[in-house]
Amino acid sequence: MNYTIGIDLGGTNTRIGLVEESGKIVEVIKFKTYDHKELNDFVETLSDNIVSIAQKYNLPKECIKAGIGAPNGNYYNGTIEQAPNLPFKGIVPLVDLLKESLKTKSYSAKVVLTNDANAAAMGEKIYGKAKNVRDFVMITLGTGVGSGIFVDNKLVYGKSGFAGEAGHAIVQPEGRACGCGRHGCLETYCSATGIVRTAKELLKNESTPSLLRAINQDMITAKDISEAADKHDPLALRCFDITARYLALGLANVAVITSPEAIFISGGLSKAGEKLFKPLREYFEQFLYPVFRNTISIEPSALEDNEVAILGAASLVF
Amino acid sequence: MNYTIGIDLGGTNTRIGLVEESGKIVEVIKFKTYDHKELNDFVETLSDNIVSIAQKYNLPKECIKAGIGAPNGNYYNGTIEQAPNLPFKGIVPLVDLLKESLKTKSYSAKVVLTNDANAAAMGEKIYGKAKNVRDFVMITLGTGVGSGIFVDNKLVYGKSGFAGEAGHAIVQPEGRACGCGRHGCLETYCSATGIVRTAKELLKNESTPSLLRAINQDMITAKDISEAADKHDPLALRCFDITARYLALGLANVAVITSPEAIFISGGLSKAGEKLFKPLREYFEQFLYPVFRNTISIEPSALEDNEVAILGAASLVF
């Protein structure tokens, strides 16, 4: 059996999955990323876990294959650079460190790293709906908005290795402050955090009755908004409408650059279903350059959120 | 000598150039596109001119190589589709028609077509500053704003063949009406027409003295604005500042998608020099996603406007 290890390195958890070439995830080990404030400790725990999986499944010591999806991951350099939500600051040469650590444990490894949204795009390409699609965009709606873009059957990395940051395309020049220091980035409106900001703004500026008013405003989550919308709460439905409109604008601007055949959406908010997708498709057609109208599909990812990152990371080295 | 024919098909003129592989343009014939309201007449004139060049320079009858840059040109299909500024409406299978017409004159041809901005990008790649640049964006500032985008050393065509329409990325969702039927497209602000609209708005809404007030407002051109700016006219300088700011925003949004190493700008407005490029570079750095700052150059194209289209078209088939 041909196995690969897919590693989903997130701000909260790091999950290590053993993946068959067919896309079946055989086993997952996870540990808390934040329990390791020291980079070397983290690398040690990561390599220990890889070795334990390798031993259990008898993987060949001379060639372990591992892919890593991580925020701000740079494919060219094998580094994680300035990731705001990880405990390790600056430029972290994770691929080199992991390979060295595995070497001290008598394992030789091929390790590839990219950012989490690129990994998701690769997962969709190898195991999801994008199998036969040469040009597509993968959007991940999580705490932030990530994207991975395929052009002519290849993931776009660009000069820097950081291409495909659609979440930081500016959709409203004088808009909301973004964590990146600028204003009006797509993710300030369309991430899980973004829709919560929208809800808080509406609750503050309007007097519309809403189920959300029963919740302490500091505690409102995207899930609360989604549940209220399911109960036809007008204010919660408007939150989805506003989110869909900005996302449509951002996607129409990506489409005009790369002319995709399809756009796939994963991540927590994508689970909202037609509350999001219906207005999204409508606004998208409105914002789309006419020559592209009715030719680009927008669909939820075929992969489960808990598997897309591991499968995507694994598929980097298959 | 290895010759190629580069054809610049524009709304006003069609220019046919004979190009050496070195990039030297040996001869140019031109005729009025608009003198031919009938498509078949146009194709006849075009093929007659190609044959006359072929005879004069003894090109091999069995293999003429010709590249065409045309508005709304589709590389995949060899068609011009719904071009608003050409007399031929609908979908025009120009490559097939030209090959057939040449065949009746005993010439066999390889003909390739793409849109004018893609041809310009190809010209910059083969003969200009982009020779050693794998990831770049070419922007043409003319009556409209066109773009051609290289990713990993290849021109991006996308699923449709119409990728790289940065001029129709929306930079101001509730902004100016665009000829494409939408609002706030980059080209409504940054084309030659766009800067004239900016000037007219400022002249109407403000009472600032300006050299431009001496000109009949219906007759103001981008050149007038440029000349007034050269004389330090504050209103004209603001026109360039506004143009630069929108262009910077549009380019920053392209950069976050494809992560280019460089951006090259050609077309009439690019001749304005530092009046445009200085504020453009400043705003660009402000709008740019921080990880890209100070890594992407913005420069005028190395090619003259009257040669870029012909060289670009010719380079499609070299």
Image: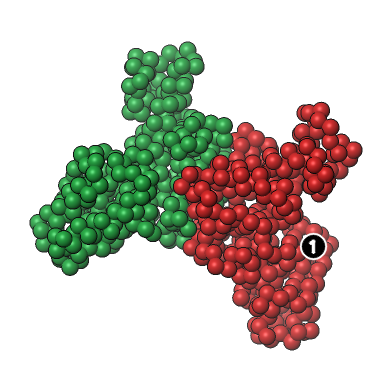
Chain colours: A red, B green
Residue A161 at x, y percent in the picture: 56, 59
Residue under the point 66% across and 44% down: A279
Farthest-out residue, left: B56
Residue under the point 39% across and 22% down: B232
Residue B287 at x, y percent in the picture: 57, 40
Residue B193 at x, y percent in the picture: 39, 31
Chain letter of the residue carrying label 1: A
Between residue B75 and residue B117, name the one nearer to us: B75
Q: Which picture quadrant has residue B153?
A: bottom left
Residue under the point 75% across and 69% down: A43
In the rendered structure, the answer to whether residue B67 lies left or right of residue B269 reads left
In the rendered structure, the answer to whether residue B195 lies left or right of residue A18 reads left
Three-letter amino acid code at disc 1?
Answer: Asn
Of the 4 image quadrants, the one containing the N terminus of chain B is bottom left
Q: Name the residue under label 1.
A: A13
Between residue A83 and residue A241, name the one nearer to us: A241
Q: How many marks?
A: 1
Packing grade of label 1 (10 A; few <14, some 14-19, many >=20) is some
Residue under the point 52% across and 56% down: A260
In the rendered structure, the answer to whether residue B41 lies left or right of residue B290 reads left
Residue B68 at x, y percent in the picture: 29, 53
Q: Which picture quadrant has residue B285?
A: top right
